Image (spheres, rainbow, N blue to C red):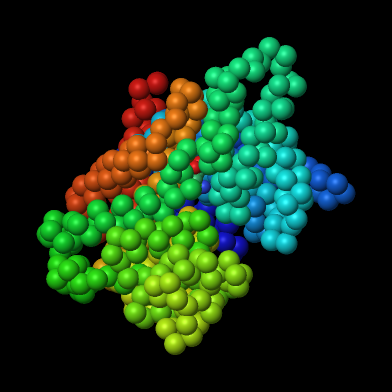
């Protein structure tokens, strides 16, 4: 089965199980499975034709929210799965948003800047009728970034202006229109702290989890399982924890950098071209500079400010996942921990910074073994949380300092973690994913019931 289909099946399967466990009516469960709208668009750039999607899954809690990815594996099923996960993620994060996602089937690596701009603008012209600051708010995702958001929002504003002659063009009105996209550059209404937000949010959640383990705030029901997990001993003896990060894009890099600054030892990182292992711990910033020079982290054995072949060795991206580290952080693509490698995973905590990196089978297997998996809908929700703060600033014509944004993010992430930890504490095993889905579905259905 292709990965998109598998991902959609997994997301729907958890929703069905969770909603049944919570005793919700069948029609409500169905409404949570099927998206409200699926927009499939075909558009041209020069003489090339592209297929794109914008899928609006659920807007019970507020406008649809979610990124746009450019990738050759984009499919209707994949985008639908990701839109579904956005509904859950926004509810977990406590945001007044529903879930949506967009994608274009394209391999953008090797595109010139002007080709990328043409593609971004053409896609926005195709989806412009379906989005808006109060209705559906896109953002960056895989292979898209603030620069691409700048082209997209510019095209969107132009489009709105040509459609309606009574759009005022004062600053306030422009800011509101720009709120249709988040993850923008600062100069056109982006928020300070947005670029780092996904990585920062992940580190905050990881620290919250470790502090529970450290203080031994563990419900009796899963104490036995966790005692198999050497992690508890290590955390409680204040040992420096080792981390391997798969993916060195915006999410992986900032996770590594901020975790390093918080005292974790980053022993391995990878990108799509290869991986490095530095047993004594690498410096994420020097590694990034080296990657910029070489085009890959492979060969970047960087400690402190120096990179030297004697510090480490090159390994494959697959073997990075199987290293005997305390914490494994898949921060690239979906389904990388699956039936074929789950038995070889040695990490004690997995932080899902990508969307859907652990398949359902692998999740079940590893959870039974006592591995603590922090699910994507919680771990990577820092990105959409600061997207919300950006949208909020635009809608009110405000601008906040980076500190203010970071402080608000910390409060939001800690609150989201606490609700899920508390929910999981009532379960028989430490299953943060089920708990997250329960918290989210309860919030969505409660809002629903207040409408009918
Ligand atoms: N693409 C990111 C995600 O999957 C961010 C979405 C957003 O900011 O709307 O969470």
Q: Is residue 224 visible in the rendered structure shown here? A: no
Where's residue 85, x and y in %? Answer: 47, 47
Q: How many marks?
A: 0
Residue at the image point whose x is 53% and y is 79% from the top: 299
Answer with the quarter of the image where residue 52 lies.
top right
Q: Is residue 452 above or below residue 417?
A: above
Residue at the image point whose x is 53% and y is 38% from the top: 186
> Which residue in the rendered view is the most extreme toward the right?
47
Where's residue 260, x and y in %? Answer: 34, 64
Where's residue 86, x and y in %? Answer: 47, 43
Q: Is residue 43 visible in the rendered structure shown here? A: yes
In this picture, residue 193 sits left or right of residue 420: right
> Which residue in the rendered view is the most extreme toward the bottom?
310
Q: Is residue 397 above or below residue 111?
A: above
Query: In front: 245, or 196?
Result: 196
Residue at the image point whose x is 13% and y is 58% from the top: 215
> Which residue in the rendered view is the most extreme toward the front?
305
Quarter of the picture holding the N terminus = bottom right
Quarter of the picture holding the C terminus = top left
In this picture, residue 157 sits left or right of residue 396: right
Residue at the image point whose x is 57% and y is 54% from the top: 142
Where's residue 401, x and y in %? Answer: 39, 36
Answer with the quarter of the image where residue 139 lies.
top right
């Amino acid at each position: 089965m292709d990965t998109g289909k598998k991902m959609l099946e997994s997301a729907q399967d958890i929703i069905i199980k969770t909603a049944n466990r919570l005793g919700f009516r069948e029609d409500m469960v169905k409404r949570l499975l099927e998206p409200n709208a699926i927009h499939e668009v075909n558009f041209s750039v020069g003489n090339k034709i592209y297929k794109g999607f914008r899928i609006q899954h659920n807007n019970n809690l507020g406008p649809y929210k979610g990124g746009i990815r450019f990738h050759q594996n984009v499919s209707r099923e994949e985008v639908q799965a990701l839109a579904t996960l956005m509904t859950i993620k926004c509810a977990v994060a406590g945001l007044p948003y529903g879930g949506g996602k967009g994608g274009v089937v394209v391999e953008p690596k090797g595109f010139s800047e002007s080709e990328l701009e043409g593609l971004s603008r053409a896609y926005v012209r195709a989806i412009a009728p379906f989005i808006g600051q109060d209705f559906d708010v896109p953002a960056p995702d895989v292979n898209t970034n603030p620069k691409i958001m700048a082209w997209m929002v510019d095209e969107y504003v132009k489009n709105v202006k040509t459609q309606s002659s009574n759009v005022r063009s004062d600053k306030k009105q422009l800011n509101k229109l720009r709120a249709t996209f988040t993850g923008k550059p600062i100069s056109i209404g982006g928020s300070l702290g947005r670029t780092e937000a996904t990585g920062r949010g992940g580190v905050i959640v990881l620290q919250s989890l470790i502090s529970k383990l450290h203080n031994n705030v563990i419900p009796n029901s899963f104490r036995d399982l966790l005692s198999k997990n050497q992690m508890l001993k290590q955390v409680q003896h204040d040992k420096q924890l080792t981390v391997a990060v798969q993916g060195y894009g915006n999410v992986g890099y900032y996770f590594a950098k901020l975790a390093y600054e918080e005292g974790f030892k980053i022993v391995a990182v990878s990108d799509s071209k290869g991986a490095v292992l530095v047993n004594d711990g690498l410096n994420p910033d020097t590694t990034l500079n080296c990657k910029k020079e070489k085009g890959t982290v492979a060969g970047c054995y960087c400690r402190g400010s120096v990179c030297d072949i004697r510090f480490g060795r090159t390994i494959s991206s697959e073997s990075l996942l199987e290293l005997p580290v305390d914490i494994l952080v898949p921060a690239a693509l979906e389904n990388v921990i699956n039936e074929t490698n789950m038995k070889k995973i040695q990490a004690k905590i997995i932080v899902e910074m990508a969307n859907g990196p652990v398949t359902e089978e692998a999740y079940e297997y590893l959870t039974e073994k006592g591995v603590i998996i922090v699910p994507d809908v919680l771990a990577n929700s820092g990105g959409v949380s600061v997207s919300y703060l950006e949208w909020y600033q635009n809608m009110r014509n405000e601008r906040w300092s980076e500190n203010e944004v970071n402080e608000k993010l910390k409060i939001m992430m800690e609150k989201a973690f606490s609700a899920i930890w508390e929910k999981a504490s009532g379960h028989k095993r430490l299953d943060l994913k089920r708990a997250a889905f329960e918290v989210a579905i309860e919030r969505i259905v409660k809002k629903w019931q207040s409408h009918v």
